[in-house]
Amino acid sequence: MPHGTPLISLMTIGLGLAFVFGMIATRLKLSPLVGYLIAGVVIGPFTPGFVADAKLAQELAEIGVILLMFGVGLHFSLDDLLSVRAIALPGAIAQITVATLLGLGMALWLGWGVEAGIVFGLALSVASTVVLLRALQERRVVQTEKGKIAVGWLIVEDLAMVLALVLLPTWADLRNQMEASGGGFTWDQAGQIGLAVLLTFLKVGAFAAIMLVAGKRVIPWLLHRVVHLGSRELFRLSVLAIALGVALGASELFGVSFALGAFFAGMIMGESELSHQAANETLPLRDAFAVLFFVSVGMLFDPMTVVNAPLQLAAAVLIVIVGKSVAALVIMQMFKQKKESSWLIAASLAQIGEFSFILASLGLGLGFLPEEARDLILGAAIISIVLNPFMFMIVDRLAPKPKAEPVISASERAIIVGFGRVGSRVARALGRMRIEYSVVEDRQEVVDRLHEQGVPAIAGNAVSVDVLKAAAVDKAHLIYVTVPDGFEAGRVVEIARQLNPKIRIFARSHNDAEIEHLTGRGADVIISGEEEIAQAMIDATKSVATHAATPAHA
C-alpha cells in the first residue's frame, strides 16, 4: 500500500476492481454484485497481493449501509404493502420462520448453540433488496400483481430484520449481565430482560413518533425551501445531510442503529413530492458507497471455506436456494395464488444479500456467531446470487406462456411495446389512421383495461422471445418500442429484427448514446426527445416572430 494513502488506495483499487469484476459478471449474465464481492475477496487478507485497510473498509461500509437503508426507505410504499398484506405479511413471516428453523437445525448439528443458530437462520432467511428489485425490474414486473407481492414480501422481511438489529444488542447486554452474575437465571433477571426489551421498544417508538410527527413536517418543508433556492447542488447536499444526520441522531440520542435511522429518513422523504428527485440526485453516491459496502463484505470472506468446509457450505446454500424456495411455494399454494406468481416469489427469494451481511457482522461483533458462520453466510450469499439468474430461467420455462388476443387481419399491422404516455398516444394516432395494432404491456391491469376496450393485448415483457412470438411479431409490418429504458429497448429491437427482418422498427431515445445503441440493434426510425423539444421550441419561435412581423388589420 502506498505510504500514507490507505483511504485513497482502498477507494481507487477497490472501485477499480469492482468495475472490472462487475463488468465480467454482467457479461456472464450474472448480477454485478457478484463482481463486487469477488473484488473484495481479491483485496482481502485471505488472498495474496494488495490488502486493503480493513478498519477503513468497515467505516466506508457503514456509510454504505446508511445509504442502502436510506434507499430502501425512500422506495418503501405502505400502500403497496397494504395492497398485498393478506399474502405478503403471513407469507414472509412463515418463510422467515422456516428458514430460521433450518438454520437453527444446521447450527445445532455443527455444535454452535441456540443463539448462534437463531442469528444464523435469520441471516439465511432474508433476500437481497438489490438483487430482487433488479431482477423484477429487468422483467418489468414490478408494477404487476405478482411483482407487488414480491416487493411486499421483501418489505416485511426487511422490517423483520430491522427489528432483529434493534433487539440483538439488547439481548447481548442482558446475556453479558447474566454471565457476570454467575450464569444463573432468576425471576429478577427475567424482569430485567422484560424491562430492557420494553425500554428498547420505547426508544424506537419515541424515535418513530418524532420522525412521523415532526420529521414528516420538517423534512418536506426543508426540501421545498432548498428547491426554491434554485441550486441543484444544495438540494443534493440537503438530501445527503438529512440521511446521514438522522442516522447519526438516531444512534446517539435513541440508541437506535444507523440502519433504522436511515430507513426512517428515507421513508419520511419518500412521502414528499420531491422524493423522485431526491432519489435521482443521490443515486450516484448511493451506488458508489453500495459498491464499497459489497467490496468490504467480500474482504471478510475466506475462499478456503470452499475447501475446508464444503459440506457445511453446501448445506447453507441448500437452505437458501431449496429450503426458502420450497417454503415460499408451499405458502403461496396454501393461499391459492397463481402458479406463475408462486414460481416468481420462489425464484426471487432464493438468494441472500445485504441484510445477511449486516446481521453476520453484528452477530460476530456481539459474540453470537463464530467466524465459521460468517464465512458460510458470505459463501452462501455469493453462490446464491450467482445461481439466481438460473432460478429465473427455470421459472421462465415452467411458467405458463402468455397468449395474445386474436388480431384482426389488415393490410398493415402494428405492435406497440409499452402502453404508457408515449405508447397510448401512438395507439390513438394509429387508430385515426385505421391501422390495426396490438399491445405488449407488462402491467396486467393495463392489459385487462385494453381487453375491455376491445384492444388486442398481451401481458408480458417484450424482451422475452416467447412474448414477441405470442404477439405474432413475425406477421407484423410495424413495431413501436416506446419503453423508456434504452438498453431494454435495444434488446426488444434486436429480437424483433431477428424474428422479422422485414419489419419497420420505431424507437425512442433520450440521448446520442441511446441512438447509437438502438441503431446498432436494428431500429429504423429513432425519435429523440431532446431533438423534438428543440425543434418545437424553434417552430414556436418562428411562429411568434412571424406573428410579430405581421401588421395588424383594423
Image (spheres, rainbow, N blue to C red):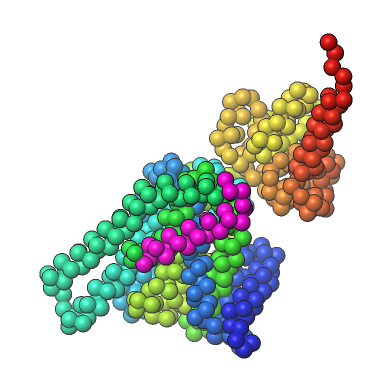
Q: Position of residue 454 (x, y in %)?
A: 64, 25
Q: Residue furthest top?
A: 554
User: Residue at left 39%, top 56%?
Assistant: 159
- In-front residue for pair 457/11: 11
Q: Is residue 227 left or right of residue 417?
A: left
**What number of labels is visible?**
0
Q: Position of residue 322 (x, y in %)?
A: 47, 63
Can residue 438 be seen in this snapshot? yes
- In-front residue for pair 457/264: 264
- In-front residue for pair 178/126: 178
Can residue 152 be seen in this snapshot? no
Quarter holding the N terminus is: bottom right
Quarter-wise, where is residue 475 in the image?
A: top right
User: Residue at left 41%, top 47%?
Assistant: 216
Quarter holding the C terminus is: top right
Main secondary structure of the magenta stretch: helix
User: Residue at left 55%, top 35%?
Assistant: 445
User: Residue at left 38%, top 52%?
Assistant: 211
Looking at the picture, does residue 97 appear above or below residue 438?
A: below
Q: Position of residue 455 (x, y in %)?
A: 65, 28
On whether residue 241 falls in the magenta region, the answer is yes
Q: Is residue 119 left or right of residue 278?
A: left
Q: Position of residue 257 (x, y in %)?
A: 38, 65
Q: Is residue 484 left or right of residue 286?
A: right
Quarter-wise, where is residue 441 in the image?
A: top right
On whether residue 187 falls in the magenta region, the answer is no
Magenta part of the protein: which range? Answer: 228-252
